[in-house]
Amino acid sequence: MPAPSRSEAAIQATGLVRRFGDFTAVDGVDLDIQPGEIYGFLGPNGAGKSTMVRVLCTLISPDGGSATVAGFDVATEPDQVRLRIGVALQDAALDEKQTGIELLRLQGRLYGLSKAEVASRLEDLEQLVDIGDALGRPIGTYSGGMKRRLDLAAALVHNPDVLFLDEPTTGLDPVSRLKVWEEVHSLNDQLGMTIFLTTQYLEEADELADRVGIIAAGKLVAEGTPEELKRSIGEDVIIARIEGDADAARAAVADLDGVSSTDLHGDELTIASATGAALISPVAVALSNQGVRVKELTLRTPTLDDVFLELTGNRIGVGDESEEDDQ
Amino acid sequence: MTAVTTTPAPTDRGPVIRARKAGFVTDTVSVAGRALRGIPREPETILPALFIPLFFFVVNVGALQDFSERGIADFDYKAFQLPVAIIFAVTGISRASTLVTDIQGGYFDRLLMTPVRRLSLLLGLMVADFALVCALCVPVLGLGFALGVRFETGVIGVVAFIGLAGLWGLVFTGFPYAIALKTGNPGAVASSFILFFPFAFLTTSTLPREALTGWLDTVAGYNPVTYLLEGLRALVTEGWAWGSLGKALLAVAIVGTLSMSMCFAALRGRLKRG
């Protein structure tokens, strides 16, 4: 297979647009992801993450703009793209009537591997799948974690250059989630695989991604390393959960010395500052003087959720029933 | 978090194994292999297809043989009914419900993200369907032989009989596949069975064409199954009647053109919608 030739980037998108009727799921997204990078695509349900993945994986065509994966255009050279990508979609996409080994063998055959090559790859992936004799059982009998691991193995059977993981740990227990994280690190460290990871879990993006893109309502609203993004809203964050006139409370703290910015989200007042520890007391006094009752006052370093709040005015909600992207 | 070493680097094991296009035949055989493996795992979809033709064959022969043979000289009602039983066995048998399950469960997307040829995804299923409907002919033919039916065309005629019936079964699968791909809805696919009734009953399924009158005779004249049955019956009772066989093949070709056009249009539509 020839190496990518026309674009140095592993994934590149320029003004990418995808609509479903009147709804614009992906709205002019630009991406430039280098080979060997782990890129976290962070956003709440319905933000456009899965649609973006489906466009990049050639399942749907873009309505505007362009994108290349491994140097090939997703719209005009989909077959070349498919040879170079591995994909684990949001829900483990498996045939429950097949056994695990049948599914992996079929997957290998469809990627043009010979029987010997498939056997060799199954040996390579044995530790990853890590389900022992269950590989010979129908997939319908597997637990959720086993299905996820088999799904990941199916995505890797042909040694892809670029791996797409669409919310790979949604619904997994903490132990299984940690195992997936370890595997993602391992694939990237040992094989230099480029990994495009969508997630709604902040700690997942923080833990795994070299760079994070934040998507909201189909638009890429920020991009950078997790540290860069967090630094962009200040070094410390004071969170005040209050009861009373929230607007008055915000006005009362906004003018204090050392406050970089304030955000109000329900009963939660977020105050960004370079000197959070020194500002705690003045904030408490200012709120008290304003007649606002403080239920909780917390000082911490910024998280990606704070970044998201700063950029979109909303926190990332986790646990909605479904992703509305793929309508 | 400490990275763990769970995936061995391929460079430790010689040349890196890379993906390449498998080729049309390999793609089709791979998809067909999966479909064939799935058949014995879903006996609930096969047993009715086996029971219904045997049941109708026995009941029709038991109820109408004496009456029919009394009215028409040298008329072998068992031989007349055997092709009907075969049509009952092969019409509407498909893996369309499995295709819907694949679509709903996301496995169809997984297949679409491989370099497999899109046509092979459908043709592979149809190859498996053809094998299945041919296999379903065997017990029905066995019952016919047990009841004394003999083929004028001999063993080659039996093979041709199975092939023609299998071809009809194959072209008919285009309808449920079209519905499956268009709707992705298991209920809609199940309701496609309704198509079976006009094809199977508004024809010479119980009486010869010359005994039909009025609107039923008119409708039977437009029903391709009438000509298919004529061709199949010729193989049993007449010999190599090329005129009847030609008409049967033409009827299959016409229905096949319609059903496959619908089916592949539905596939193109689904691929476009994503």
Image (spheres, rainbow, N blue to C red):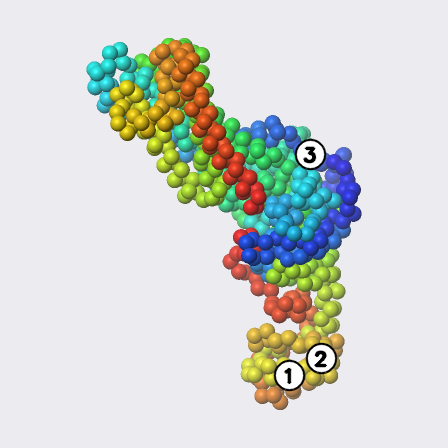
> Can you identify the residue that label 3 sits on?
B20
Query: Residue A264, relative to residue B84: is it above or below?
Result: below
Secondary structure of the residue carrying numbered label 2:
strand
Query: What amino acid type should be assigned to the residue bearing mark 2?
Result: Val
Question: Which is more toward the observer, A147 or B257?
Answer: B257
Query: What amino acid type should be assigned to the residue bearing mark 3?
Result: Arg
Question: Which is more toward the observer, A190 or A91?
Answer: A91
The residue lying at 71 percent from left, 36 percent from top is B18
Q: How far apart are marks 1 and 3 (CA)?
A: 63 Å
On the question of residue A136 being in view, the answer is no
Q: Are marks 3 and 2 on the same chain?
A: no
Image mark 1: chain: A
Query: Residue A294, relative to residue A130: is it above or below?
Result: below
Secondary structure of the residue carrying numbered label 1:
helix
Q: How far apart are marks 1 and 2 (CA)?
A: 11 Å
> Can you identify the residue that label 2 sits on?
A259
Q: How far apart are marks 3 and 2 (CA)?
A: 58 Å
On the question of residue A31 being in view, the answer is yes
Question: Which is more toward the observer, B257 or A259?
Answer: B257
Image mark 3: chain: B
Image mark 2: chain: A
Neighbour tally class for label 1: few under 14, some 14-19, many 20 plus, Cα within 10 Å: some
Residue B256, how many percent across, how many down? 47, 28
> Can you identify the residue that label 1 sits on?
A251
Question: Which is more toward the observer, B259 or A35?
Answer: B259
The residue lying at 64 percent from left, 46 percent from top is A57
Q: Are marks 1 and 3 on the same chain?
A: no
Neighbour tally class for label 3: few under 14, some 14-19, many 20 plus, Cα within 10 Å: many
The residue lying at 29 percent from left, 25 percent from top is B217
Residue B141, how many percent across, how many down? 37, 19
Whether pointer 3 and pointer 2 mark residues with C-beta atoms closer than 8 Å, the reply is no
